């Protein structure tokens, strides 16, 4: 490097310690300033260029208009490029005139000029890509300013010392360069305008993170407004921002779904090749092993989906880990500086500043890592839930018999949460070994081979924790099986709670639930004990490593002196080592649970699903809407065909009726058209959008209007038409809140007929091309059925011109259909128009003979259709619907009796030639405050959460739930732990004051016997460690049963207040950090001794330091 700087008047050395280090006015040599210091920003920008270009290539949000800010940035970049080239030409000018400038005056202007041109081009490229704030260029300009500050000072000092300016031209160009760089840095801190042609953000409260600048993202300043608002008043749902586009489920789920489909394609490729016929000899066939079936890996799909987030979080974590080892080295230098009275004063300021900068950088980078990794964890959970939900909609019917709804819900709620819980610790897989290796390396530099003693302790504990983790995994598998069975049983109980109450079966089912819960609690208790043991071992590991390493160092050789520098630098390294070792229990526990959940999710996603291509939706015969050619269908591949040899062609706009006896396959035909059955043979084609009305109406838990709209935009004319044609207007007058009435779960507050009409109105509003109606008229009365057929389904209805497939038993509607399909035993026996089928004495004639009496009875009952409107609504509400089964005998008998009474009233009214009597209401019924309910129509009240401080009664309720004796004992253990932690300061004070008492600082010539501590000191030195270990072990044993025993009592009926308190406020948030705040930092301003007797006192302090680590594990273990 000295050759680059040349010699002569302007030449200098690259490094001069007397000028830079050993002086009271430090400065860098001109060669260093003109070479390496000027090259640092250039090296950074060129190193970051490939990754940044890759990011910009995939970051396209439209382009930004060339604004004044962009013009100023570009102009500054061009001026800086010109300044660099002017310096280069000036060097050539001097070379021509025989001044022979140093090579650095050619290299540096050339490199800086090319870099400034690159920065200018990046400014424009970022504008074209829609980047409003560039972190790469902000850091580049900041480095340019920082690296120019030192020459800024040096040139002024040199001019003052010499009394003149040695090189006026370069002096002038440098200060112009400094002013331009400073302006460029200031301008880069401002944001550009939003890009054109970017997706329009319609959110009323968008997330400010998306539009935040670099420094705002770095310091989380964009979150300040919400934090201030939360400080002033409790936050509400409306205060929260909308999700950014990258966090929305339609983006995240689709990415994971594509990655999973690629895994399935790759796994199916080798299997397809293996199934190809090959010519082989007999020996080869007999001896060759069966090819292993390769299953798609869901873990690989997750990694490929979130690779960018994982790499970004890993980069932040790597930088933070490396920065954490800078402070121990600076601490070592600082201690040497304090002990050296001849050292320059500016050393101390420089070291303190570097330690501050290092700690600040660690904080900024660590929190960026946490933000990145927690956002990734949330996306992983969202994606997994979405993929499982989509899989649940496409699995075959045979798989539905294996997986219940409760098990699928368990996969989405419990197993998906496992991935979110383990994601923040996933980088410990490589970060923990890296920190351990670096810590041991630096300890080797300080303590020598004695550091291997600590390594031996860590290695010996690995097999023990491995055995514990394997046992925990076994318990986790068994626990999830019990959880699935419990959720399945609870789902059945809640679905049939009405029958259960009517037959008083609560004690029987309660015993079954408690039996499963008891088995689950036993596994939880065993797992809690293992978790406590594993956590206790890893918490004590740093303490044991520290004690054994320093003990071996002092005992192997009497010349080994534990002075201040070795003690506190080693201690800081041990504290760094303590962090990954304390987090390893959570990583092991989380990985164990996640591995079980991964296998469960992967097994579910690998199950068979319906073929999406079984129904062709693109190509079809001209003029046809639905065609089936030689179709054979089954509900499962292992079951016999339900429908076989079907040949159907339905023209566009036709009304087709499907009739037949019960169990002939009418609903199966509709399911086959929807693609929900296994197609064994033939071809099915459906052209256009499809609306489906099932026989059992599906109702959402939302308002009636939202049930009809079903996510579509509001069209008032079409909406009013759907309500009117489906006979829902009269129901809106009766419902408490009109169409804003909230419908309960499964339509519990609607009658069967109302549910069916809401379902039909939803289909009418959808305005689809094809309507598949699975006997929607069976749930309503005859007059309502006639109204719906005339106004909706029939030739004069709103669906006229649409293709309609109607499954029905109503004979009166058949003459108005275009043609009829007659099914019997899964086959089409007849097909044609009503008049044609009447001429044949076939299946259709048998169908008419079987259902004609019922039809006549319904026709006689339909005479009352001109009676009062209220009576019609009442009959429709209380008639026998399809939802009344044998499981509701009491309600069924009551409604039958009521309908018989209504029939008798109707007969009397008709005999006297007077209208049917209205239903009389008492005055008390009229005084029911229905107006208040009608204003809202809400079934579920808004949840009210208490705000403010937690009341003492909440803590008291939880203490009684855990047990007063257990609570008191745990509090005593915490108090003992704090007492031991305070004792650490006493031992540290005694160790640092040992010099003043003995007056033998840095005296290493004394014999071991003279410096050996007395047995009294040795006994006291073990006391803090014994107390800490006793507290930790006892507390782990007491906490583990209490955390698993109390939920057993909670499985019975408990008060909501106690349940809420136990869920929200355990453990106390401050329990994990209260002890850490009491630990003072080492008094670096003191002078420390270096002798064996003081080393033993230092060991006392190390023993009590374990209490800090132990204070954290109950929070994690719980």
Image (spheres, rainbow, N blue to C red):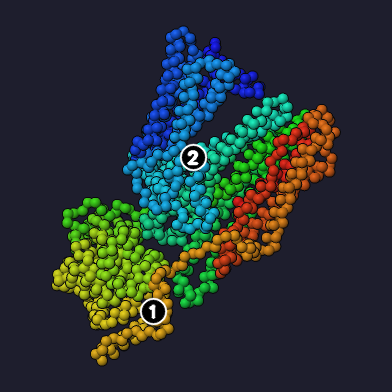
Residue 426 visible somewhere in the drawing? no
Which residue occupies the extreme bottom position in the image?
912
**For this rendering, which residue is in front, 1114 or 335?**
335
Q: Quadrant of residue 357?
A: top right
Crowding at mark 1 (Cα within 10 Å: few <14, some 14-19, many 20+):
some
Q: Quadrant of the N terminus?
A: top right
The mark that comes first in sequence, 1 or 2, is: 2
In this view, 560 is above or below 233: above
In this view, 232 is above or below 45: below
Give coordinates of residue 597: x percent, y percent. 50, 52
Q: Left or right: where does residue 429 sit relative to residue 792?
A: right
Q: CA distance from mark 1 to mark 2?
A: 69 Å
Which mark lies nearer to you, 1 or 2? 2
Give coordinates of residue 351: x percent, y percent. 64, 31
Residue at image coords 77%, 47%: 1023
Q: Label for residue 892?
A: 1
Residue at image coords 38%, 59%: 398
């Amino acid at each position: 490097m000295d050759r680059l700087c040349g010699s002569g008047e302007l030449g200098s050395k690259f490094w001069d310690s007397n000028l830079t280090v050993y002086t009271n006015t430090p400065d860098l040599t001109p060669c260093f300033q003109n070479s390496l210091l000027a090259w640092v920003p250039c090296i950074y920008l060129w190193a970051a260029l490939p990754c940044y270009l890759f990011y910009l290539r995939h970051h396209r949000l439209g382009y930004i208009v060339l604004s004044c800010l962009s013009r100023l940035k570009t102009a500054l970049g061009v001026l800086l490029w010109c300044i660099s080239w002017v310096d280069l030409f000036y060097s050539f000018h001097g070379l021509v005139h025989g001044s022979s400038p140093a090579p650095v005056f050619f290299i540096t202007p050339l490199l800086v000029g090319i870099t400034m041109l690159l920065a200018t081009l990046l400014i424009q490229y970022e504008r074209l890509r829609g980047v409003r704030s560039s972190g790469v260029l902000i850091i580049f300009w900041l480095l340019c300013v920082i690296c120019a500050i030192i020459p800024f000072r040096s040139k002024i000092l040199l001019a003052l010392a010499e009394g003149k300016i040695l090189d006026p031209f370069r002096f002038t160009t440098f200060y112009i360069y400094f002013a331009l760089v400073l302006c460029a840095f200031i301008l880069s801190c401002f944001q550009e305008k939003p890009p054109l042609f970017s997706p329009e953000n319609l959110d009323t409260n968008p997330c400010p993170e998306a539009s935040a600048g670099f420094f705002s993202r770095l310091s989380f300043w964009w979150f300040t407004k919400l934090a201030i608002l939360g400080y002033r008043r409790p936050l509400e749902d409306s205060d929260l921002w909308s999700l950014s586009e990258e966090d929305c489920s339609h983006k995240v789920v689709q990415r994971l779904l594509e990655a999973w489909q690629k895994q399935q394609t790759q796994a199916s490729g080798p299997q397809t090749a293996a199934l190809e016929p090959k010519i082989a000899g007999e020996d080869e066939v007999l001896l060759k092993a069966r090819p292993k079936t390769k299953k798609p890996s869901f873990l690989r799909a997750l990694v490929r989906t979130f690779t960018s987030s994982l790499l970004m979080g890993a980069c932040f974590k790597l930088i933070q880990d490396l920065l954490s080892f800078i402070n121990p080295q600076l601490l070592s230098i600082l201690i040497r500086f304090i002990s050296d009275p001849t050292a320059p004063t500016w050393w101390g300021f420089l070291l303190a500043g570097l330690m501050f900068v290092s700690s600040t950088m660690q904080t900024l980078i660590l929190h960026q890592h946490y933000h990145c990794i927690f956002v990734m964890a949330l996306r992983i959970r969202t994606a997994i839930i979405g993929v499982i939900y989509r899989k649940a909609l496409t699995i075959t019917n045979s798989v539905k018999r294996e997986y219940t709804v409760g098990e699928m819900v368990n996969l989405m709620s419990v197993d998906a949460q496992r991935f979110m819980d383990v994601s923040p610790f996933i980088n410990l897989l490589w970060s923990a070994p890296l920190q351990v290796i670096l810590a041991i390396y630096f300890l080797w530099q300080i303590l020598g081979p004695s550091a291997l003693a600590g390594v031996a302790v860590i290695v010996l504990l690995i097999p023990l924790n491995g055995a514990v983790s394997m046992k925990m995994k076994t318990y986790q598998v068994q626990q999830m099986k019990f959880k699935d069975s419990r959720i399945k049983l609870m789902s059945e109980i809640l679905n049939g709670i009405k029958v259960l109450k009517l037959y008083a079966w609560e004690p029987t089912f309660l015993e079954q639930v408690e039996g499963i819960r008891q088995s689950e609690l036993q596994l939880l208790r065993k797992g809690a004990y293992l978790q406590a043991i594993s956590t206790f071992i890893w918490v004590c590991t740093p303490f044991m490593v520290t004690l054994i390493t320093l003990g071996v160092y002092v005992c192997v050789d009497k010349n080994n002196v534990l002075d201040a520098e070795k003690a506190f630098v080693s201690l800081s390294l041990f504290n760094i080592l303590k962090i990954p070792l304390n987090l390893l229990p959570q990583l092991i526990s989380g990985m164990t649970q996640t591995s079980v959940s991964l296998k469960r999710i992967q097994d579910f996603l690998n199950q068979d699903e319906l073929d999406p291509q079984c129904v062709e939706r693109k190509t079809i015969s001209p003029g046809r809407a639905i065609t089936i050619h030689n179709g054979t269908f089954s509900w499962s591949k292992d079951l016999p065909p339900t429908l076989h040899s079907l040949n159907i062609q339905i023209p566009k706009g036709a009304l087709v009726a499907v009739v037949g006896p019960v169990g002939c396959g009418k609903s199966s035909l509709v399911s086959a058209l929807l693609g929900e059955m296994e197609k064994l043979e033939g071809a099915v084609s459906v052209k256009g959008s499809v609306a489906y009305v099932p026989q059992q109406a599906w109702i959402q838990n939302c308002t009636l209007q939202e049930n009809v709209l079903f996510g579509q935009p509001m069209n008032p004319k079409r909406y009013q038409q759907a309500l009117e044609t489906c006979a829902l207007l009269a129901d809106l007058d009766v419902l408490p809140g009109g169409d804003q009435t909230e419908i309960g779960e499964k339509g519990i507050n609607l009658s069967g007929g109302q549910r069916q009409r809401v379902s039909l109105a939803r289909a009418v509003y959808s305005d689809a091309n094809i309507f598949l109606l699975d006997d929607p008229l069976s749930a309503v009365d005859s007059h309502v059925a006639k109204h719906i057929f005339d106004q909706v389904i029939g030739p004069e209805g709103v669906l006229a011109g649409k293709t309609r497939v109607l499954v029905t038993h109503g004979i009166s509607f058949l003459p108005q259909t275009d043609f009829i399909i007659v099914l019997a035993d899964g086959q089409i026996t007849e097909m044609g128009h009503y008049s044609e089928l009447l001429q044949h004495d076939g299946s259709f004639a048998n169908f008419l003979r079987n259902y004609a009496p019922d039809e006549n009875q319904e026709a006689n009952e339909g005479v009352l259709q001109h009676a009062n409107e209220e009576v019609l609504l009442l009959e429709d509400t209380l008639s026998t619907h399809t939802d009344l089964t044998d499981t509701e005998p009491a309600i069924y008998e009551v409604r039958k009796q009521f309908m018989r009474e209504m029939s008798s009233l109707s007969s009397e009214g008709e005999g006297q030639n007077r209208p049917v009597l209205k239903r009389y209401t008492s005055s008390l019924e009229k005084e029911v405050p229905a107006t208040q309910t009608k204003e809202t129509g809400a079934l579920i009240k808004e949840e009210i959460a208490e705000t403010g401080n937690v009341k003492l009664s909440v803590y008291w309720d939880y203490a009684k739930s855990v047990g007063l004796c257990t609570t008191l004992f745990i509090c005593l253990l915490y108090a003992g732990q704090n007492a031991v932690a305070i004792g650490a300061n006493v031992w540290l004070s005694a160790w640092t004051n040992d010099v003043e008492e003995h007056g033998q600082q840095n005296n290493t010539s004394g014999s071991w016997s003279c410096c050996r501590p007395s047995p009294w000191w040795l006994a006291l030195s073990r006391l803090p460690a014994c107390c800490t270990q006793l507290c930790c072990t006892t507390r782990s044993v007491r906490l583990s049963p209490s955390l698993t025993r109390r939920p057993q009592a909670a499985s019975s009926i408990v008060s909501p207040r106690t349940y809420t308190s136990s869920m929200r406020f355990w453990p106390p948030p401050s329990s994990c950090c209260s002890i850490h705040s009491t630990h003072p930092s080492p008094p670096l301003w003191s002078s420390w001794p270096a002798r064996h007797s003081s080393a033993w006192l230092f060991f006392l302090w190390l023993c009590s330091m374990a209490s800090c680590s132990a204070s954290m594990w109950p929070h994690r273990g719980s």
